[in-house]
Image (cartoon, rainbow, N blue to C red):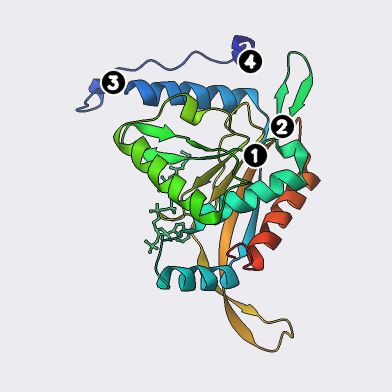
């Protein structure tokens, strides 16, 4: 890994107090650990991020009806976990891990989806095991409970291990697109930002209709996945999200 930095200038050392008043804070253990993983992954994996938008107008109408009918509240995150589980079954090279030392690609027959959770101590990624075999309500309940646990008590290593792909959603905050960093040893990560309502021509082109568009940002390991496959993977997600059928 250190060879990758060869030839680069040393990190700038500065006494910031020379320029004005400062406060020095030590980063927490989790933030430092997560930061070291992110730094490694960013440097060691050739990332490309594919951007697209899913028309979620029908899905959002069904989700809103589902939530109004009572029962467990559904956000778009469990729907995305379900769509990702379907996409991993259709595109096995996305459900894989690559060992550059041996040149071996391990293809996984299980589907465990990680969901990034923003906590006061840093970013944690609990894994929803067997996402392909769980109902939408089960996934929604599990995300809610594991996210609450991540924010209050923290998570065990076991609860954050074994993920096949990660979902990172900033949609409740905003954004139009971003470049998420792959959570090694996975080979792809899906980032989601805020859905927006846009005016578009209808199929005939004669009328303008309002559509809800969800921005998707898929970062992938270009050693394993080529751009065309990434575009097909995201297209698959878009089709899965467009028909509203994810909500039974
Ligand atoms: N577009 C528009 N609104 C969205 C949305 C989107 N893409 N995604 C979520 N929302 C809305 C939800 O519908 C909900 O709205 P209402 O309360 O009005 O129904 C609201 O935002 C709150 O969402 P939430 O955060 O409570 O729940 P969630 O299921 O969307 O997300 C979780 C759960 C755990 C993924 C999220 O809370 C979280 O921690 N995300 C941060 C991940 C992160 O930091 N990633 C960065 C990694 S890189 O550093």
For label 4, the residue is 4
Work out whether mark 4 precedes mark 3 in sequence or the reverse, and give the earlier one: 4
Nearest to N terminus: mark 4 or mark 1: 4
Which residue is identified by label 1?
111
Tell whether 231 sits left or right of 75.
right
Image quadrant holding the C terminus, namely: bottom right
**Identity of the residue drawn at 28% across and 22% down:** 16
Where is residue 48 drawn, in percent x and y? 67, 39
User: What is the secondary structure assignment of the residue under circle 3?
Assistant: loop
Q: Nearer the viewer, mark 1 or mark 3?
A: 1
Mark 1 → mark 2, Cα distance in angstroms: 8 Å
- The answer to which image quadrant residue 23 occupies is top left
User: Mark 3 = which residue?
Assistant: 26
User: Label 2 near label 1: C-beta < 8 Å?
Assistant: yes
136 or 187: nearer the viewer: 136
Mark 2 — residue? Answer: 108
């Amino acid at each position: 890994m250190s060879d990758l930095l060869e030839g680069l200038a040393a990190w700038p050392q500065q006494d910031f107090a020379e320029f004005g008043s400062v406060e020095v804070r030590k980063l927490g253990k989790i933030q430092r650990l997560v930061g070291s993983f992110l730094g490694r992954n960013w440097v060691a994996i050739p990332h490309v991020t594919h951007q697209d938008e899913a028309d979620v107008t029908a899905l959002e109408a069904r989700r809103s009806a589902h939530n109004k009918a009572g029962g467990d509240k559904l956000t778009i995150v469990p729907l995305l976990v379900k769509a990702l589980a379907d996409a991993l079954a259709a595109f096995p090279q996305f459900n894989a891990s690559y060992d550059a030392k041996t040149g071996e690609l391990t293809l996984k027959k299980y589907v465990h989806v990680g969901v990034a959770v923003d906590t006061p101590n840093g970013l944690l990624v609990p894994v929803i095991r067997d996402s392909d075999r769980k109902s939408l309500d089960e996934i929604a309940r599990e995300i809610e409970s594991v996210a609450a646990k991540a924010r209050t008590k923290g998570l065990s290593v076991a609860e954050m291990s074994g993920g096949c792909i990660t979902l990172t959603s900033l949609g409740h905050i905003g954004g139009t697109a971003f470049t998420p960093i792959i959570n090694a040893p996975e080979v792809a990560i899906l980032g989601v930002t805020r859905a927006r309502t846009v005016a578009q021509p209808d199929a005939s082109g004669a009328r303008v209709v309002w559509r809800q568009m969800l921005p998707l940002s898929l970062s992938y390991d270009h050693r394993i996945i080529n751009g065309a496959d990434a575009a097909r993977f995201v297209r698959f997600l878009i089709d899965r999200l467009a028909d509203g059928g994810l909500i039974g």
